[in-house]
Each structure stands twice: as C-alpha cells, then as structure tokens.
Image (cartoon, rainbow, N blue to C red):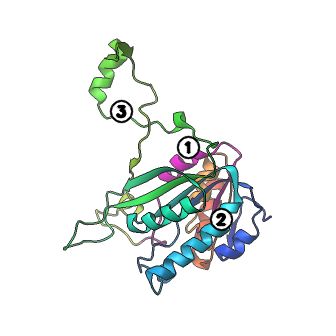
Amino acid sequence: MLTINKIYLMDCFDFLKKIDDGSIDLAVIDPPYNLQKAEWDIFKSHDDFLAFTYRWIDSLVPKLKKTGSLYIFNTPFNSAFILQYLLKKGLIFQNWITWDKRDGLSAAKRKFTNRQETILFFTKSNKYTFNTEEIRVPYESTERMEHAKIKGIIKNGKRWFPNPKGRLCGDLWHFSSERHKNKINGKTPKLPHQTPKPLDMFERIIKASSNPKDLVLDCFIGSGTTAIAAKKLNRNFIGCDNNKKYVTIARKRLASFIKSS
C-alpha cells in the first residue's frame, strides 16, 4: 500500500495496483471526458474512451470498502454509459447529480448550449456513510422562513419549524465554475489546469460521504482540489496524476494550504 496523504506522479492503473483492496472510504473521480480539450482528453473514438473508462473503473471498484462511496464526474451523455456499467458491476445507484455551472462548455448554435455536468453517486452496498445534516443548504424562501421561525407552518396537521441549518440538499447543485470565480476585470483568465473543479463542491461531497480520518482517493487528481478539500475537513487522502505539470501544481497548492492552516 502506498503512503497516504501524498500526491503521486503515476499512471492511474499503476497507482491503483498499489492500493490495498477494501481500503478506500470514498473515491471522488474527475476523469477525462473525451472533449478534445487537451492531449490527455483525446481518444480515437467514443468506444476507445469507454474502454479506457471501464478499465479504470474495473481497477478502482475493488479498492472501495463495502461501506465505500464513489462519485464520478462527466458529461450527461458519457454518464449514461458509465451508469449502466456501474450497475453491471453490482454497485448501487444513489443519485444522478446535475451540476449547474453558471458557465458553458460550448456556444452551440444548432442545439441547446451545454451548461451542466453530471456527477454520478454510487455506493458499494446499502450500508454507507451519508451525513445529511452536514450538507444542508439555505432555504430559498427566506422571508417565509423568517416568519416560520416564529409561528411555524402547518403541514399535515402539525406545526413545522425550519431547520436552523437550512433545507435538505437536493440533486441540482449550483456552483460557479472556477473560470468564472476567478474573473479579472470581468474577463475569465486562463487557468493552470484545463478543468479545475470548485473546492466548495468537493467539500460538499467529502462532508456528505466520509467521516474524519476516512481515506479519500482521487486517481485523476489534476490540480489537487480533492487533496485540499480532504485536508481541510480532517480526512486522509491519496491521489495521483500522470501529468508532471499538474502534479507539481497540486503539490504546491497543498503545501501552501497546509502552511496557511
């Protein structure tokens, strides 16, 4: 077993071979999408892309504990194939989460513009961690909720009062993309990584599906967001990427976070 709380410069398959079976509490995976956006995201065909995807899934699934959870990011189209494959592998479907990016992957003129990504949430069994209270979100009807705090709202003959932590988290998530969060003078900058994910979104996943000291895995760790979110929330992590530039960025970001925390 590799040493935990480290980011490795390794191919995902070599990396997963060195992870003990049944050792991972949570896997958060943001793999290639086959969108042709960078060299690492280019495949000869959709079939080649799926073969690669199914291969890393085959390598990853045994590493999860029986109580383990798996989140996979991708396009809605690709996710339809991935979902069916995970079901055939015997994993249990929990949610198809839609990430409303407040951004677009393209400026389509002959179809509706893509402004979402999919996050598939599966578990290894029906016994798994899910911390509902840790991921409540603000109520949308703030004025009505302020009134309800005092007198409550009658529901099914009972008086209901809003939860001070907010409402239950749904499967439609509103997180601005990193591109738009880091605008400079109204312009979106070129970021060191092509497809960074928002830290607060990864924090939600890790809060929901792991507990302190649990082990979180990411075998396409990119700029290191999973590692930083895990450390911030007192979880252990282990991750890799086969791109030397990204691993250098990830290690520097992690070291900077640890130094400042």
Q: Is residue 261 magenta?
A: no
The numbered mark at residue 208 is: 1
**Quadrant of the rendering where the N terminus is positioned:** bottom right
Taking the spot 38% from the left edge, 13% from the top edge, the residue there is 158
- What residue would you read off at disc 3? 139
- What residue would you read off at disc 2? 60
Q: Is residue 213 magenta?
A: yes
* Dot 1 amino acid type: Ala
Distance CA(mark 2)–CA(mark 3): 37 Å
* Dot 2 amino acid type: Leu
Q: Nearer the viewer, residue 22 or 198?
A: 22
**Placement of 124 over or under 38, stated as above or below:** above
**Residue neighbourhood size for the residue with mark 1, other residues' Cα within 10 Å, grouped as few (<14), some (14–19), many (≥20):** some
**Placement of 186 over or under 109, stated as above or below:** above
Taking the spot 55% from the left edge, 72% from the top edge, the residue there is 53
Taking the spot 37% from the left edge, 69% from the top edge, the residue there is 189
Point out residue 257 in the picture as x, y percentages from the top left corner. 61, 55
Looking at the image, residue 116 sits to the left or right of residue 2; the answer is left
Q: Nearer the viewer, residue 144 or 19?
A: 19
Looking at the image, residue 25 sits to the left or right of residue 223; the answer is right
Distance CA(mark 3)–CA(mark 1): 19 Å
Point out residue 246 in the picture as x, y percentages from the top left corner. 57, 73
Q: Which residues are magenta?
A: 191-220
The local secondary structure at tag 1 comes to helix
